[in-house]
Amino acid sequence: MVEALDRLGAKAEKLILHSEEWNTNSTRKAENGTEVYTTEARLLQKAQGMYHAVLQPVPVQRVTGDVTWSDSFTKLLAFNQTQYRRVLALDSDSTMLQPMDELFLLPPTPVAMPRAYWLEHELFDAITLITPSSASAARIQTAIATRLDTDFDMDIMNHVFGDSCMVLPHRDYALVTGEFRKQEPGQHVAYLGDGGEEWDAEKVVDEAKFVHFSDWPLGKPWVASGRQVKEEVRPKCTREGSMEEDCRDRVVWEGLYRDFRERRKAICGPELVDWESEETDWEVARLLSNPTSRPSAVDRSPTIGTAAPVL
């Protein structure tokens, strides 16, 4: 994420909230017996030196429950960063396609979030514009302390700010990859907001500024999943009034994942790659099922911790 912010020319300062157990000086013994920097230290150094990020160690906020979200409250510590006037908090399982500095020019508000357009009356906290304050941080901590076991970060944000939050347009700032998997007529109405508009996967991804990876039961975009799971989850090609298959949803969806992973490998290093053998098998299966399909050239970035441009 910090690479994308840097490459796209974000004018705000880049802040990484990372585990306080990590630091830039940690070392380990290599196989040849020499002392080398740990992966965490190396990546923090790179984020700081190459991408000009500010490093902020924080205690991981861990709760019992589903491991997918058990650490998710950590990102809410962005409310504590009162050294900044505003923080744009971005989830690490997302990718940034276009600059978003314009969000810092919105009228004053404690919190701004897009709608979770696939749900009723819910807000989505994968991207959140925050005015840090001790009062808001205290409200968050109280809500966490009294939460139900089934409540995680998005639930807490809705409980605390659901009635007062400024709403960001989801078509710019809250596209989820699962949208490309919808096949039935009318299923895109919630995203498009206009029953008369025709769904066009390529147009949608070209317009989007921020995309969140969400394709349960597929895991986070940096985690290897079984080939069978990927086959079941990836978008289907369609035939509507034509003998030729329309695979645009699949091409865009696969392109988002592929570009994220290629950039992660290039920037973070091969030691963080655990999906390549499965990806090779998946690519063979993809080409066998549709030899003419090609990944789309959409821009993606890997992540290190939680990144937030701040003013």
Image (spheres, rainbow, N blue to C red):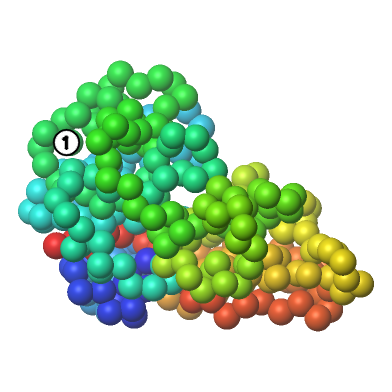
Give the residue at x 65% y 44%. 217
Image coordinates of residue 276 in percent, x first then y, are: 65, 68
Image coordinates of residue 73 in percent, x first then y, are: 33, 38
Image coordinates of residue 82 in percent, x first then y, are: 10, 48
Nearest the viewer among 68 and 237 is: 237
State the SS at label 1.
helix
Residue at the outermost left position: 83
From the image, tell me which residue sits under label 1: 136
**Up-down: is 214 above or below 309?**
above
Nearest the viewer among 11 and 192 is: 192
Split into 4 quadrants, where in the image is the N terminus? bottom left
Q: Quadrant of residue 96?
A: bottom left
Report the side of 236 relative to 105 (left or right).
right
Give the residue at x 68% y 49%. 186
Number of numbered tags placed on the structure image: 1
Give the residue at x 62% y 67%. 201
Give the residue at x 66% y 48%. 187
- Mark 1 surroundings: few (<14), some (14-19) or many (≥20) residues within 10 A: some
In the image, what residue type sits under mark 1?
Ser
Nearest the viewer among 200 and 218 is: 200
Nearest the viewer among 147 and 283 is: 147
**Up-down: is 178 above or below 4?**
above
Q: Is residue 254 visible?
A: no
